[in-house]
Structures are given as C-alpha cells and as structure tokens.
C-alpha cells in the first residue's frame, strides 16, 4: 500500500504496531483522525503520552494507579486480609467488573515460565510473600491462567508460604456458565467432576 | 467497566472514539502501550499529533500531501490531462494500489447528498470545473460510489461541463472478479448486461 504522504505513513505505521491492528485498519483510524479538529487530535495524542508518563504502579499490589497507593488498597471498606493473586492488570479489571470481590489484589506481572525465561525473580513474588508475612493475611486466592505455568506458580508460592497461617484457595475451574457439556474439553470436564460441590454449597450469583 | 486509574480511563476513552474500536479493544491497546517504553509511546503520540498538525492538502487535487502540491500532481510522467474524480483520499490510495492508472486525481470530499446536508458548495466541485476549463483536460473518469448520490454527483458535474471538449467516463460497474452470478444483486446484473462489451475490447489485466 503506497501512501501519498510521509507524515501519513508514519502515523499509519505507528498505529499498525498496536495489537490486532493491520495496515488497513490503521489507515482507517488515521484518516478518521485527519477529519477531526487539530485540537481534538492533540488532545488524543496528549492523553496517551501523559497516561504513559504519569501513571504509577501501586507500591503494595502493583495495580496501576494515579497515586502511590491504588484506590483498592486505600479503600478501608475492603478486606485487606484477603489477597487475590492475578497475572495482569487486565485480570484486576475483569474481577472488579463482577462486583463480587471485596478483598485486595496482588499483580504478579505474569506466571513462572522457564521456556519464556520468566522465573520467580522476574515476577512480584518476593513482595507477595513479604506482604503475607507482615500483613497477617488470612486468605490467598489464586486467579491465574488454568495451564501448567499457572499451576507451577501456585505450587511455588504455596511452598514458600507453607509455614504461615494463611488459607490458600484457587478460583473454581469448571464448565462455564452457559457452556455446553458436550463441547467442553476433557480436562475441564474431568476437573469439574473431581471438584464437584454439594448443591447446597453452590453459590448462585 | 471500572478502571483503576483516571489517566488510564482517559486514554481508553480517547481510543474508543476511533472507528470500529470499543471499550475492550481500547483497553487492550492502552495496556499494550503501558508495557512499552515511555520514549516509544511519546514517539507514537507525537507522530499522530504532528501528522494532523503538519499535513497539507494538495492545492490542485485535494489529496493529502507533505507539500503544497502532492507527489501525483508533481509527477511529470503522469498524464495531467486525465483526471479521475473520487470521493475520498482512501479511494486515491485504493486506485494507486492497482498500479494501473497513470493520470491525476481530484478528491471531491464526498458526494452530493441533500439528506445529509451536502450540497455542491460543500464539495470541491467548483475547483474541479475550474481545472477542466484551464488545464485543457481531455478525459474525466468518475470513480464514485455506485449509488443514487454518486449518480447525482456525476449528473450535476456533467451538466456543468457539457460545453467543454472533455470526454466523460465512469468506471465499469459489473460482476466483481471472482464473484458468482447467482449471488449478484439484480441491479448489478442488469447493468452489467446492459453495459456488455465485445470480447475483443475486454481488457484483461
């Protein structure tokens, strides 16, 4: 695709670096911006640059934040003794959207994956263990990816905190709500059978 | 979707204004940028702002350009007496991609559409007529949308230049290459029958 202007081409190439955006979609976005007022486009551009420049990460849970401590950690109405361990900020946003969780978080930044060169040192694991030791944490809820790497990470952290009086749980794996049994993979179906619950314990939301 | 930071929310809202981008995709893009270096994000942001600030429109054909005259108009190897009339810059890029056209362009900026409040005055029609009058244009090729608005625009311009010695043509409408007859709409099929060509005139590219 040959573009009539170098400036246009630069902008298209920058947009095309975003995930899921090809050259054609990038061009569509750039031509859209070209139709907007200069002030609007500068506002767009500035809000992205200042987001990256000024955003902070909570010193306690590593969630994104406008301040040194995020809104969730600073909220005294939330159970500070329950920590939900997640991989990324996106997981925090997903769990917050359910409006069903009232504890705090800890963002690991990934999971242990030797093949990708991610060891425990690259993740926020030391700080998590320090939190559990010093904050009298009562429950640690793992909400990690349901794969080998996630399970390894759970196993690693659990061993490190085995001496502490802290309940360790993981979110339920099973057939998704609205999912059909016949299309579920064997692993999920097997786990969901093995971890079956008494009907009166089953929480309906 | 509740976001943990106002800065993040601003950036997500700005991205969500782009065509075809919802809140979730916008969040995905913003979180991607959050993982990049500050310098890279500033480069992204600056290339968009400077594109909008510095880009020019060719004073002759209204294509985007880095200078006052676009590369196509400035190219002496192209037939300056053949003008292809298109709606938008995107159409110029599409036709240029075929590498089959060796004339110049005129970007109207849309088509006549009274329902949307677009009359001839809102489009670059006066400048087109002035070009035809002063540049000794030999052929005017219309490559507009195949709908009532496009046809109205062709009719309007054609009447305005009826007194000038300039051939007026329109790109062929018909069954798309690789398209199947039985799925073509009646209008397209009827036009493609009415405008049938002798086989020896049919240009294979």
Image: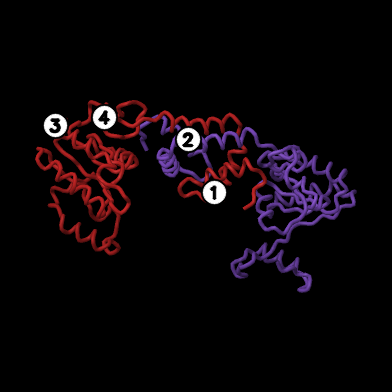
Chain colours: A red, B purple
Describe the element under mark 1 as helix, strand or loop: helix
Which residue is pictured at 78% across the width and 73% down the height? B200
Tag in front: 4 or 2: 2
Q: Are marks 3 and 1 on the same chain?
A: yes
Q: Are marks 2 and 3 on the same chain?
A: no
The 10 Å Cα crowd at callout 1, few under 14, some 14 to 19, many 20 or more, is: some
Describe the element under mark 2 as helix, strand or loop: helix
Q: Tell which circle, 4 or 1, labels the residue nearer the N-terminal end.
A: 1
Instruction: Residue A184: give x, y in percent of width and height.
Output: 28, 61
Per the image, the residue denoted by label 1 is: A25
Image marks 2 and 1: residues in contact by CB distance under 8 Å? no
Q: Chain of mark 2?
A: B
In this rendering, the answer to whether A113 lies above or below A92 is below
Instruction: Residue B152: give x, y in percent of width and height.
Output: 74, 49
Residue at mark 3 to residue at mark 1: CA–CA distance? 50 Å
Q: Quadrant of residue A72?
A: top left
Per the image, the residue denoted by label 3 is: A136
Which residue is pictured at 12% across the width and 52% down the height? A198
Describe the element under mark 3 as helix, strand or loop: loop
- In the picture, the disc for residue A73 is 4
Residue at mark 3 to residue at mark 4: CA–CA distance? 15 Å
- Of residue B61 and residue B181, the one placed in the foreground of this image is B61
Tag in front: 2 or 3: 2
- Of residue B40 and residue B85, the one placed in the foreground of this image is B40
Instruction: Residue B68: give x, y in percent of width and height.
Output: 74, 37
Residue at mark 2 to residue at mark 1: CA–CA distance? 24 Å
Q: Tell which circle, 3 or 4, labels the residue nearer the N-terminal end.
A: 4
Per the image, the residue denoted by label 2 is: B39
């Amino acid at each position: 695709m040959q573009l009539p202007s170098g400036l246009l081409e630069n902008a298209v190439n920058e947009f095309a670096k975003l995930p899921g955006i090809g050259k054609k979609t990038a061009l569509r976005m750039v031509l859209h911006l070209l139709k907007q007022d200069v002030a609007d486009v500068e506002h767009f551009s500035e809000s992205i640059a200042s987001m990256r420049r000024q955003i902070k990460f909570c010193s306690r849970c590593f969630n994104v934040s406008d301040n040194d401590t995020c809104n969730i950690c600073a909220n005294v109405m939330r159970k500070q003794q329950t920590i939900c361990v997640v991989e990324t900020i996106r997981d925090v946003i997903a769990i917050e959207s359910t409006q069903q969780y009232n504890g705090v978080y800890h963002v690991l930044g990934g999971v242990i994956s030797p093949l990708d060169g991610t060891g425990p040192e690259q993740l926020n694991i030391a700080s998590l263990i320090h939190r559990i030791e010093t904050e009298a944490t009562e429950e640690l809820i793992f909400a990690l990816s349901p794969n080998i790497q996630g399970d390894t990470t759970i196993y690693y952290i659990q061993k490190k905190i085995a001496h502490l009086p802290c309940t360790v749980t993981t979110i339920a794996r099973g057939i998704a709500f609205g999912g059909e049994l016949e299309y579920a993979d064997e692993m999920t179906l097997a786990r969901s059978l093995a971890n079956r619950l008494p009907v009166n314990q089953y929480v309906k939301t």
